[in-house]
Image (spheres, rainbow, N blue to C red):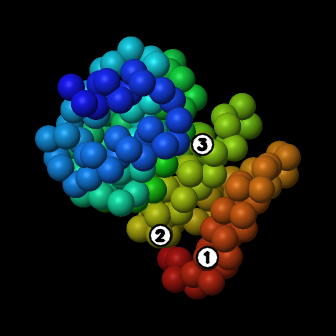
C-alpha cells in the first residue's frame, strides 16, 4: 500500500528515492514496484520506472525475473521514461545468454534510431558494449554503428559513451578472430 500511495503522491526525484529507499533489497517489495511499472496505468508505470532504475543500480540482483518483460517494454508504445528506465536498468543487471540475441538487436536498433532520446541511446551503448565484449565478431558492426551515431548530431551523453566504447574497441581489436 505504501508504494502505491507514494507513486500517486508526486513525480519527483525525492519521491523516487524515498520509494527506492523503502524497497531496498527486498524482493517482495521490488515485485510490488515492478507490478506498477509493468502492469500499471501509464502514470504509475512512469513513476515506478524511475524508482526501479534507482534500485536496479544498487541492487541489480533483483532484476533477473523481470528482464524479459523489461526488454518487451521497449517494443510497446509507452512513455519515453519507461523505455529510458528499462534500458538504464539493463546497464547493471546480469544479461542471461538466452536473451543476448534479442538484447543485441534491440540495443543496436536503439543506438541507430535518431528519433530515440539521447538517454535511451546512451544507455543502449553501454548495454551493447557489455554484449559485444562477449561476442567479438560484432565489433566491426558496433564500431560502424557508433561512428554513425557520432555523425548524427549526438548529445554529450552519446558522444561520451560512444567515444569510450570506441576506445575500448580500439584497445581490444587484436582479440578479435
| Residue denoted by label 3 | 120
Which residue is painted at 66% across and 71% down in the image? Answer: 164
Q: Quadrant of residue 30?
A: top left
Distance from disc 1 to disc 3, alpha carbons, whole Å, reads 21 Å
Secondary element under disc 1, as helix, strand or loop, is helix
Which residue is painted at 37% across and 36% down in the image? Answer: 70
Contact, mark 3 vs mark 2 (Cβ under 8 Å): no
Contact, mark 2 vs mark 1 (Cβ under 8 Å): yes
- The tag on residue 149 is none
Distance from disc 2 to disc 1, alpha carbons, whole Å, reads 9 Å
Secondary element under disc 2, as helix, strand or loop, is loop
The answer to whether residue 100 is visible is: no
The answer to whether residue 62 is left or right of residue 10 is: left
In this picture, is 138 found above or below 22?
below
Q: How many marks?
A: 3
In this picture, is 172 found above or below 156?
below
Secondary element under disc 3, as helix, strand or loop, is helix
Amino acid at each position: 500500500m505504501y508504494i502505491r500511495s507514494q507513486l500517486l503522491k508526486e513525480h519527483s526525484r525525492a519521491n523516487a528515492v524515498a520509494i527506492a529507499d523503502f524497497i531496498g533489497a527486498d524482493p517482495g517489495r521490488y515485485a510490488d514496484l515492478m507490478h506498477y511499472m509493468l502492469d500499471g496505468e501509464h502514470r504509475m508505470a512512469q513513476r515506478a520506472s524511475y524508482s526501479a532504475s534507482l534500485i536496479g543500480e544498487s541492487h541489480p540482483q533483483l532484476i533477473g525475473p523481470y528482464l524479459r518483460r523489461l526488454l518487451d517494454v521497449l517494443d510497446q508504445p509507452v512513455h519515453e521514461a519507461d523505455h529510458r528506465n528499462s534500458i538504464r536498468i539493463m546497464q547493471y543487471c546480469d544479461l542471461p545468454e538466452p536473451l543476448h540475441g534479442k538484447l543485441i538487436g534491440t540495443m543496436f536498433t536503439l543506438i541507430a534510431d535518431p528519433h530515440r532520446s539521447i538517454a535511451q541511446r546512451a544507455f543502449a551503448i553501454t548495454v551493447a558494449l557489455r554484449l559485444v565484449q562477449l561476442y567479438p565478431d560484432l565489433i566491426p558492426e558496433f564500431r560502424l554503428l557508433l561512428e554513425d551515431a557520432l555523425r548524427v548530431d549526438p548529445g554529450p551523453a552519446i558522444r561520451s559513451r560512444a567515444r569510450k566504447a570506441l576506445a575500448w574497441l580500439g584497445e581490444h581489436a587484436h582479440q578479435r578472430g
